[in-house]
Image (cartoon, rainbow, N blue to C red):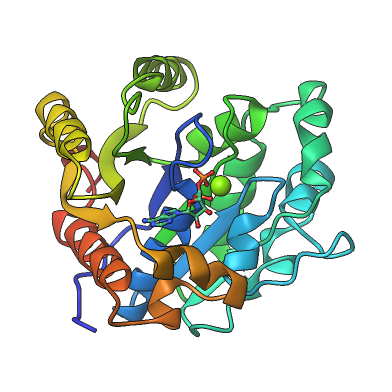
Amino acid sequence: AEDLPVPSKTRVFTIANQKGGVGKTTTTVNLAAALAKSGARVLVIDLDPQGNASTALGIEHRSETASVYDVMINDVPMADVVQKSPESDLLFCIPATIHLAGAEIELVSMVAREQRLRSALDAFLAERDEPFHYVFIDCPPSLGLLTINAFVAAREVLIPIQCEYYALEGLSQLLNNIKLIERHLNPELNVSTILLTMYDSRTNLANQVAEDVRQHFPDQVLDTLIPRSVRISEAPSFGLSVIGYDANSPGSLSYLEAAAEIARRGAPIAQQ
Ligand code: ADP
Ligand code: MG
């Protein structure tokens, strides 16, 4: 793979969209794998109780496995729960287990309940000898306390948008929520990146949606579109990214290209 510039400071992304099934987890896993393939050291934090990102990275996440739940609720250091993905020596994951489903309720009564992930991540990043270049946090499809913790821990938001009808519905609500977080909890938060996913160039509708989104967010939308591809949907059942599963497939090449764009653009100016 092409050598890409690595950031001097860790770039922490939250992958967010309160809609389910728009490609959040797929984007998290494949961008992380793509950047690791280019030589960056990458951490994925699975913050969805479904644990789909853990599964897709071939990471053990049975109910007994130490996980992000223990980090957020029991103050276990991230260093004690982090696992290396079988796919790459540069790709790591903080897994989610089914226990995380209860965390949304347990967090409510905790002190600094919005900052739990941020504190744990900052401590983990500070004590590492080998720095992480990228962190990607995969969110559940809701705007509860888990997602708020992700927004507080991150500096950048990446929104995957499915190229289908209703794609923009709910987006203004998401952006309003991000503004609220920015105002009250994390002034550094920046919607830096929008990625169009599940694109089918044969339909006029997909083209129309892509054009609309580009018009609304000219600075955020990546040039690269992720095509709808069977290879992308097959890869997780092998515990691999699409890059590990079928490196030369169109889905793999598109995620490698999207990752290259993210690396070349660099962090938002205010954060460099
Ligand atoms: P989310 O995390 O937003 O709920 P997922 O990433 O799990 O969404 O994607 C939802 C479903 O769509 C999954 O079955 C996934 O394999 C499939 N999928 C995602 N992106 C693509 C794509 N580009 N082509 C084909 N299938 C895709
Ligand atoms: Mg998901």
Question: Looking at the image, how many numbered discs can be counted on the residues?
Answer: 0
Left or right position of 180 against 56: left
Near-viewer residue (198 or 61): 198
Q: Quadrant of the N terminus?
A: bottom left
Quadrant of the image occupied by residue 257: bottom left
Q: Residue furthest right?
A: 64
In the rendered image of this protein, does residue 200 appear above or below residue 166?
A: below
Q: Residue at x 27, y 55 (%)?
A: 226
Residue 36 can be seen, yes or no: yes
Residue 140 on image: x %, y %:
60, 39
Quadrant of the image occupied by residue 30: bottom left
Residue 94 on image: x %, y %:
64, 61
Residue 33 on image: x %, y %:
41, 71
Q: Residue at x 15, y 39 (%)?
A: 207
Left or right position of 164 against 125: left
In the rendered image of this protein, does residue 269 appear above or below residue 78?
A: above
Residue 104 on image: x %, y %:
75, 30
Quadrant of the image occupied by residue 79: bottom right
Residue 41 can be seen, yes or no: no
Near-viewer residue (250 or 262): 250
Near-viewer residue (133 or 220): 220
In the rendered image of this protein, does residue 2 appear above or below residue 16?
A: below
Q: Residue at x 63, y 74 (%)?
A: 58
Near-viewer residue (21 or 222): 21
In the rendered image of this protein, does residue 99 appear above or below residue 213?
A: below
Q: Residue at x 31, y 33 (%)?
A: 190
